[in-house]
């Protein structure tokens, strides 16, 4: 099973998002956050989060790029439980148990998106607000076909 982790190439996410995700944390689309937004909500850093921010599942901050990687089933379930608790604290779900199925569905959507891609594939998200609500599209940036030997010097620590 694959999911995506936050990745940073520079410090720009620190400046463009109110709450930036941390490098390495697991991420999902998080488009649900914007389900009741209107054009009036799209200003400044909030607009940036709406336009192209993935949601980190540790900090619940946003990140521009995510990288596809393997995840264990047990870790996925732990993430679903944390997301369900987030739904209770920030979105008014009555209990984490009541929100757990929706949290699992959000993670499952991201797993489905990631499973068709090789590890280290980068993904971006773009959102638009229309009459029918929020529309998300994804861009895929495949890893380059380069072997480690092109970047590393190999040697031995043995004297012989």
Image: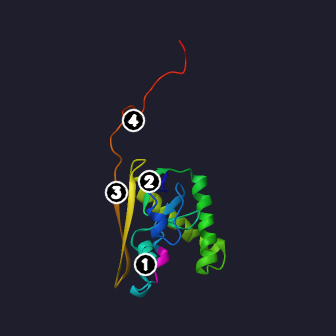
Quickly name the residue at label 4. Answer: 151
- Mark 2 surroundings: few (<14), some (14-19) or many (≥20) residues within 10 A: many
Local secondary structure at mark 3: strand
Local secondary structure at mark 2: strand
Quickly name the residue at label 1. Answer: 44
Label 3, label 2: how many angstroms apart (C-alpha)?
A: 10 Å
Residue 144 visible in the current orientation: yes
Local secondary structure at mark 1: helix
Q: Residue 158 at x, y = what percent?
A: 55, 17
Label 1, label 2: how many angstroms apart (C-alpha)?
A: 26 Å
Closer to the chain start, of discs 3 and 4, is 3
* Residue located at (33% from left, 41% from top): 145
Closer to the chain start, of discs 3 and 2, is 2
Label 3, label 4: how many angstroms apart (C-alpha)?
A: 24 Å
Closer to the chain start, of discs 4 and 1, is 1
Q: Nearer the viewer, mark 1 or mark 2?
A: 1
Instruction: Classify residue 86 as left or right of residue 130.
Output: right
Quickly name the residue at label 2. Answer: 67
For the stretch drawn in magenta, the main secondary structure is: helix
* Residue located at (46% from left, 80% from top): 35
Q: Looking at the rendered structure, which numbered label has been put on residue 140?
A: 3
Label 1, label 3: how many angstroms apart (C-alpha)?
A: 26 Å
The magenta span reads 32-36
């Amino acid at each position: 099973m694959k999911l995506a982790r936050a990745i940073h190439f520079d410090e720009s996410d620190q400046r463009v998002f109110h709450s930036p995700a941390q490098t390495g944390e697991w991420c999902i689309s998080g488009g649900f956050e914007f389900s009741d937004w209107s054009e009036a909500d799209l200003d400044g850093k909030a607009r940036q989060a709406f336009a192209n921010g993935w949601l980190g599942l540790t900090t619940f901050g946003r990140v521009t790029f995510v990288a596809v990687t393997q995840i264990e089933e047990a870790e996925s379930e732990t993430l679903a439980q944390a997301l369900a608790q987030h739904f209770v604290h920030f979105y008014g779900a009555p209990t984490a148990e009541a929100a757990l199925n929706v949290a699992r569905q959000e993670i499952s959507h991201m797993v489905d998106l990631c499973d068709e891609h090789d590890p280290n594939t980068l993904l971006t998200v773009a959102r638009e607000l229309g009459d029918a609500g929020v529309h998300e599209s994804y861009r895929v940036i495949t890893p380059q076909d380069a072997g480690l030997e092109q970047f590393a010097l190999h040697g031995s620590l043995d004297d012989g």
